[in-house]
Structure formats: structure tokens, C-alpha cells
Amino acid sequence: MISERVMDAATITSWMREIDVAVRAEKDHLVQLDAAIGDGDHGTNMVRGFEAVVQALDADGGSPPGKLLILAGRTLVSTVGGASGPLWGSALRSGGRVLGDQSSFEGAELVEVLAAALASVKDLGTAAVGDKTMVDALEPAVDALRTRLGQGASLDEALDAAGAAGESGMRSTIPLQARKGRASYLGERSVGHQDPGATSTALILRALQRAARAT
Amino acid sequence: MAVETNQMRKFLNDPARVVKESLAGLAAAHPDLVRYDAAAQIIVRKDAPRRGKVALISGGGSGHEPLHGGFVGHGMLDAACPGEVFTSPVPAQMLAATKAVDGGAGVVHIVKNYTGDVLNFKLAAGDAADEGIKVTSIVIDDDVAVQDSLYTAGRRGVGATVLAEKIAGAAAEGGADLAKVTDTVRQVNERSRSFGVALSSCVPPASGKPIFELPEGQIELGIGIHGEPGRKRAQLASASDIVDVMVEAVVSDLKPKKGAKVLAFVNGMGGTPLLELYLLYAEVDKKLRAAGVEPVRNLVGSYITSLEMAGASLTVLELDEDLTRFWDSPVHTPALRWGV
């Protein structure tokens, strides 16, 4: 079945709302994870950022999906600070540029959006899989989405696989020693803790699945 | 109960507004030196921009007071960009600060080596260049507790930041050009090493919980300035023994020339009284001399802090004539003042 679900601006708005709800619900958990190997502000920062993104999108008058992603990215850069602001901000902006001015997009294009987001995170953060960062969740998710769509899975099935890959990537950070970011200062003491950035990334991927389902 | 003793007691109205309200207070206390641009969330030197003077800005998470807002003024910084507590500021703040202080001679960004600070300053420097402002950026990374390798984000920027702001600020005040001021920041960074020790954790206002738990009788060796745990834990020892560790760590990495003249900076982390900091300084002075270097300048006090953390850091800077002269030059800021 090639039933290509079409996504549009409403999908992006819904995705950002779902992220806002998810990071708010998991705020304390993210703070706890970050306090263990960082400085304990990740949950607070993500909530502040996506709250501002939802506000910015609410104020927007009918921009196409790519432009909404760019707006969301710009808002994150200007409200979050820390490392997650520039990283997720650049990711969404790069993803948004892929869509240009088109008013709707399909699964294959969503893969390209996420691939561009991943490339931008890896470039700015100079991180690779295994460094105990958000890349450990994002990269396998993008791969899973691409693979499953290529095998003819429905968008929902493919996004489910991406969400599962993100969660498995998130758990894979537990035994790793951090090589990037503030957790790397701990050396071996970072081993045994789940990376907060990979954790919020897994939430963001699951939020995408819910948003795509709703539209 | 452990939870009870960890309860937060802080002077707050609203945890979400702690940074803004504190900055407003800094400006209200020192209207002769600084102004607070609340919309941009930056502290700017009262008389900025100064035509033809190279400007210096720095910034980073809040919670390290008096760094950086307390160092804005004559002979030091032209502007400071404070982020939320322990969170890097955003590029818009750095861009606003850069524009507010640019007197046509260029702007130096002093960046502490933390992933968030480096990323946000990088974006801001690009934005400033787009607006035609000459910006140079120097990353401070003086903390010897972090191995500088492919496997870490590199050494953290700690105590040397204060020294770089003072010394390069004096160079700029004296009329040095952008290349010279930039090089002065680089020199201070290259000739400084630091090492910190925590006796307690600290409590960020937003979470209300200590960042780490330190069991009775234990200390953290090799801490940074964000309440993050250090590289290892050790039993609480005498001040003399702890200073042995600090001096050894700093001197063995700095490898100063025999008989080198140095500046020794004993910094409190926010919760350690001067009584103890001077006690530490007595040990530091003695042990540095025993290690074959001569402390000819010093700074003792809480200048780059981690909220209410109890603890201290040692920074040693190997001086030369220029750096000594710039250190001695007049400075007039909310937190540092001499010669005026």
C-alpha cells in the first residue's frame, strides 16, 4: 500500500505542541538525569524553549511547514541558551530549509528533513554515535525511518520504528563514557547514567509520531 | 532526614525571575558604572561605546557572581551577557552587547570553554560579522582537572577568565589595538592553570535541589563552576594537604620557569568565608615558594563562584612585565577596584 500520508503546516504545529507537552511532563526526569552528569538545567531549558516555540507558532499567520520549522529553530536559539538551544535550533532550521516554500510534504521528504537536522547537529556539536549525546538517539531514528519507508511501511509504522530506535539509542547511552559536552568532564563517572539530551531527543521523536497521526 | 537538610532557603520572589531581578539590583547599586538593558538582558558599561577603544565582552550562565556583570566598568569589561543560572546566554544577547559597546576599534569576546557558551558565542560572532563589526573570540580553558583530549569537550574555563578580563581590559583601556588586546587574552589563558575543590554542592534556584550529594566527610576534587561533580571524591583532609593537591596539579601542568614571578588567585566558590580563603592563601604562598616560584601578585576572594557552594579554586598565572603592568593598572568595577 502506498497510502502516502501528506503532512503540512498543521503537522509541524502539532509536533511542536506535542513536544511542549512531553518535555513539560518529563521536566523533572530530564533535570534529574542532567543533575547526575551535567548541571541539572536540561528540563528547565527545554520547557522554556518549546513554550516559546508554541507561542511563536500561534502568532504566525499561515506560513508553510518549512518556514514554521525555521521559525521554531530561530525561537529555540533565541530562548534556550546552553547547548541544546543552538543544537536543536540549528537542527530545525536546517530541516526547515529542506522544505522550502512547499505547502505539504510526504514521508520521503520527512526523512530528508530529519537527515538535514541530524547533519546540522553533528556538524555544530562535532559529535558522533557513541559519544553519549543526542546523536545516539537521533541517528538510529533517522536510519530506521528511512529503512522502513523504503521497505514500504506506512508512515505511522515507520515513525513508530523511528521512535523505538530513538528510545533504544537513548538507553544505549547508559553504559557509555561521555566524550562531548559537560558530562565529558566526569570521565568514567559518566558511565551508568542515561544521557539527558538523548532522552529529550527520544521524546521529540515520539511527539513527531503523534503529530503525524493526528493530521 | 536527608531531604529536610537539603531543603532550599533562598531569598527569592519568583525562581524564574532571579537573574533579571539580580541584574536590576546590580544596576541600581552601581549607576555610576553600569546600566542594565532589561530587554536585551545585558549589563553595559555606563559610558559605552567609547570611540576608538577596543571593547571586551564576556558572558555565561548566571550563578557565578560577581562574574561577569560585576566586572563591567573602567579597565575591565564593556558588557556582560548573563544567561539563566548555569545556562549559557543566547546569541541575541551577545549580538546586542557587541553592538552596544563597539566603538569602531573591534570587540573581543571572552568565552569560557563550555559547549553551550562556545556554540552560542560562535553563532553570535557570525551575526556580528554580518553586521560589519570586527569580532575576535578567545576561548578560556585553564582547568587542569579536565584532560584535554579527543575524549572530552576540552578543559573548562574557570579562574583565568577573571584574570584575562582584568589584564586585557587594562590593555584596551590603555589604547591597545584589537590584535594586541586579543593576544593579551590569549597570553593570560596560555600562562594560567586552575584547579578547584568542593566541600559542598550547590542549589540552583529553579530546581531547588542540590546538584550532587556529598557524603559526610567527603570532598570533590577537580570541580568546575557549575556544581557539576568533579573527577573524583576523596576524604576531607587538612587545608595543608588539600593545598598540596591543588598546587601540585597546577604547577606540574603549568611548568613555570624556575624562579618565575606568578599571580596566585585563591577563589572562593560562594559558600566559603574569607577566614578560610586567607588560611588557604597562607598555604598556597608557602607551597608555591617551595615549588620554586614567587607569588608577586595575588587575588583572594570569591570572584567566580558556584552559587552557595563551599569550596575554593587556585589559579596560578605566570606573569611577565606587560601582564604585571596591566594587572596593576587602575580598575573600577562593581566587584574589583583599585588605583582610582
Image: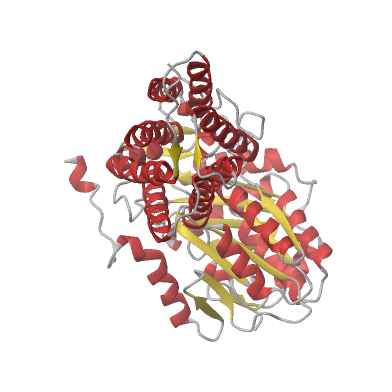
In the rendered image, residue B84, in percent from the top left (x then y), is placed at 44, 58
Query: Residue pushed farthest left?
Result: B1
Q: Is residue B264 visible?
A: no
Q: Is residue A164 above or below residue B171?
A: above
Q: Quadrant of the N terminus of chain B?
A: top left
In the rendered image, residue B330, in percent from the top left (x then y), is placed at 68, 78
The answer to whether B181 appears left or right of B57 in the picture is right
Identify which residue, B160 or A5, lies in the foreground.
A5
Q: Quadrant of the C terminus of chain B?
A: bottom right
The answer to whether B15 appears left or right of A132 in the picture is left
Q: Give the total of numbered labels.
A: 0
In the rendered image, residue B279, in percent from the top left (x then y), is placed at 49, 56
In the rendered image, residue B9, in percent from the top left (x then y), is placed at 25, 58
Identify which residue, A81 or B288, lies in the foreground.
A81
Identify which residue, B51 or A147, lies in the foreground.
A147
The answer to whether B187 appears left or right of B94 in the picture is right
Residue drawn where x is 18% and y is 46% of the image: B4
Identify which residue, A187 or A165, lies in the foreground.
A165
Residue drawn where x is 42% and y is 76% of the image: B24
Q: Is residue B116 visible?
A: yes
Query: Residue pushed farthest bottom?
Result: B32
Q: Is residue B131 above or below residue B27?
A: above
Q: Which image quarter: residue B153?
A: top right
Q: Is residue B42 above or below residue B249?
A: below
Residue drawn where x is 57% and y is 67% of the image: B80
